Image (tube, rainbow, N blue to C red):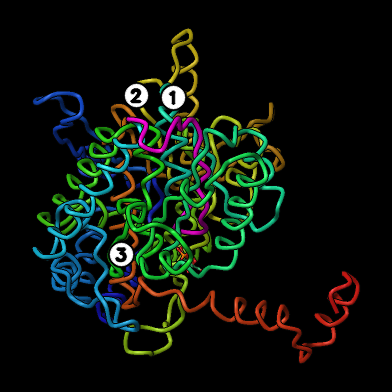
């Protein structure tokens, strides 16, 4: 890989303006549309997403070099290992089989996922049919990967239809749960306890409080209103959940990749099984593209080329994602875990220290609100921040079409302004009003934002994260970095006293010493 990186590092840097001037075909070469059949809309209904990297510094030569880097990193072999269900998570010695949930992967795993989906579908439909009495609300309790995916998908897909009103609660701060209680009628509420391990302190504490709340509010059999979503069904049984209401998923599905498994139960409950299946189908369309396409035409791989270029060559420590769509308000939060928990590492697969910045810090927000808050730094700050703009051609609202047109025009104008730069002063030379320009952005433009498109969009980011990891030689599927803090919290909880003076003083100040 060193030789490929040397070639990339030695290339002269060109500005975006120079790159556009040098190649009239640039937009065509750096843009690509993925189209698939959206079975939820009809047998021949098409959905598509246009990816435009022409406002990044990628060009033909750089892409040639990155393709060499991908070869040197054995991208093709590692992709086959991932999609073939081999043990790509080397530190935990297991596969990473989220794509099997969508029908792509090791045959036995695909079959198992499909059987578990069938079980989940039956339970969802039974609940809709009244098997647990009237169910109008669901409090979904989970944290990290057991909450961020469902919360984002619910937010995106339930804007105009909601069969069951779902509240996602993660934080151990009792206020979060109290807020959900205030919005739910206990007599018509079920509790979904989502935890891969079924041991996470926050989730189990919140689940116990939620059961108590049901009991204290007149529900005769609170335990009978719990559904467990977990890869540890034995632990759920031990905790007291009846087997008929346990929806298992495979241990080989990572937490932050688990929306597609039974962790997606609240989504299916809220939007119905057909839309949940459409989300899986959209993800599968992206999986097939990722599996079958080589080189720069592979969308997640090309995105990773840009990510690596900005992180390593241009020393960008962050990357920003701005969704110009209210329905994607929670996408930046979701991507933060996906990208930072996956690739925020410091050693390679063979335990060597990595010699480049790993995951950029992912941040972002929603346009146009973000424009009036943080875009100042993007345009004039000293940081170089590569931006992804994400938007939908079809509006999510039914108001005057002017709303959506203005939204999209703002989105495109920001990308253009970041690239072009200029000076806004009358004299044309006031540095306070100068915009340096040459600031990169990519635009991801969906035809519409339905369940299938959301699935494709998330799968795109999963594969992009994997491709980044391959180019760095790291394992994106473990997360040991969160363990030390958890251990120390447990030590404090169990009365340990061997802490640094600052922590000891804080514990005393809070009456916990
Ligand atoms: O602490 C991090 C983490 O392990 C995440 O990777 C995971 O998504 C989250 O905690 C929740 O874990 P669980 O689903 O087992 O409760």
**499 lies above or below 438:** below
Mark 1, mark 2: which one is toward the viewer? 2
The percent coordinates of residue 119 (x first, y second) are 24, 49
Labels 1 and 2 touching (C-beta < 8 A):
yes
How much space separates mark 3 and mark 2, taking CA atoms? 33 Å
**107 lies above or below 371:** below
Residue 138 part of the magenta segment? yes
Residue at horizontal 43 percent and vertical 76 percent from the top: 356
| Marker disc for residue 371 | none
Residue 219 as seen in the image, left or right of residue 406: right
Specify few, some or many for label 2: CA neighbours under 10 Å numbering under 14, 14-19, or 20 or more. some
Residue 283 part of the magenta segment? no
Q: Is mark 2 within 8 Å of ligand 1?
A: no
Residue at horizontal 49 percent and vertical 23 percent from the top: 407
The residue beneath circle 1 is 408
How much space separates mark 1 and mark 3, taking CA atoms? 36 Å
- Residue 20 image-quadrant placement: top left
Residue 434 as seen in the image, left or right of residue 291: right
Labels 1 and 3 touching (C-beta < 8 A):
no
**412 lies above or below 203:** above
Labels 3 and 2 touching (C-beta < 8 A):
no
Residue 182 as seen in the image, left or right of residue 168: right
Specify few, some or many for label 3: CA neighbours under 10 Å numbering under 14, 14-19, or 20 or more. many
Instruction: Give the residues drawn in magenta, as a range.
Output: 129-148
The residue beneath circle 3 is 253
Q: Nearer the viewer, residue 374 or 323?
A: 323
- Residue 163 image-quadrant placement: top left
How much space separates mark 1 and mark 2, taking CA atoms? 8 Å
The residue beneath circle 2 is 393
């Amino acid at each position: 890989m060193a030789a490929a990186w040397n070639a990339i590092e030695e290339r002269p840097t060109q500005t975006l303006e120079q790159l556009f001037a040098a190649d009239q075909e640039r937009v065509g070469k750096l843009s690509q549309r993925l189209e698939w059949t959206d079975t939820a809309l009809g047998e021949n209904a098409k959905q598509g997403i246009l990816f435009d990297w022409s406002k990044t510094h990628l060009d033909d030569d750089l892409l040639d070099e990155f393709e060499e880097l991908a070869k040197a990193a054995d991208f093709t072999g590692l992709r086959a290992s991932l999609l073939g269900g081999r043990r790509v998570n080397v530190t935990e010695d297991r596969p990473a089989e989220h794509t099997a949930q969508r029908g792509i992967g090791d045959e036995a795993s695909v079959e198992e996922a499909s059987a578990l989906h069938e079980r989940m579908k039956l339970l969802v439909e039974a609940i809709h049919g009244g098997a647990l009495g009237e169910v109008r609300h669901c409090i979904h309790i989970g944290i990290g990967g057991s909450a961020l995916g469902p919360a984002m998908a619910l937010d995106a897909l339930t804007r105009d239809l909601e069969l069951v009103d779902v509240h996602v609660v993660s934080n151990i701060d009792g206020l979060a749960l109290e807020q959900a209680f205030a919005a739910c009628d206990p007599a018509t509420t079920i509790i979904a306890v989502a935890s891969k391990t079924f041991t996470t302190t926050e989730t189990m504490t919140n689940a116990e409080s939620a059961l108590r709340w049901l009991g204290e509010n007149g529900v005769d059999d609170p335990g009978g209103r719990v559904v467990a979503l977990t890869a540890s069904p034995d632990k759920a049984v031990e905790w007291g959940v009846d087997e008929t209401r346990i929806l298992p998923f495979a241990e080989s599905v990572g937490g932050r990749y688990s929306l597609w498994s039974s962790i997606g139960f609240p989504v299916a409950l809220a939007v119905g099984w057909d839309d949940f299946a459409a989300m899986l189908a959209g993800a599968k369309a992206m999986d097939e593209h990722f599996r079958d396409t080589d080189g720069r035409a592979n969308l997640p791989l090309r995105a990773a080329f840009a990510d690596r270029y900005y992180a390593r060559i241009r020393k960008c420590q962050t990357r920003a994602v701005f969704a110009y769509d209210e329905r994607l308000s929670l996408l930046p939060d979701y991507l933060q875990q996906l990208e930072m928990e996956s690739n925020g590492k410091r050693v390679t697969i063979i335990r060597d220290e990595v010699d480049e910045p790993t995951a950029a810090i992912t941040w972002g927000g929603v346009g146009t609100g973000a424009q009036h808050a943080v875009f100042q730094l993007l345009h004039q700050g000293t940081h170089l921040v590569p931006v992804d703009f994400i938007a939908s051609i079809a509006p999510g609202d039914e108001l005057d079409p002017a709303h959506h047109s203005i939204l999209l025009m703002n989105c495109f104008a920001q990308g253009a302004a970041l690239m072009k730069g200029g000076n806004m002063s009358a004299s044309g030379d006031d540095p306070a009003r100068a915009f340096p320009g040459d600031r990169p952005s990519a635009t991801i433009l969906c035809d519409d934002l339905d369940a299938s498109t959301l699935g494709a969009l998330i799968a795109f980011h999963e594969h992009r994260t994997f491709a980044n990891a391959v180019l760095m030689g790291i394992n994106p599927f473990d997360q040991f970095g969160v363990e030390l803090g958890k251990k120390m919290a447990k030590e404090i909880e169990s009365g340990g006293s061997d802490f640094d003076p600052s922590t000891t003083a804080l514990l005393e100040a809070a009456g916990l010493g």
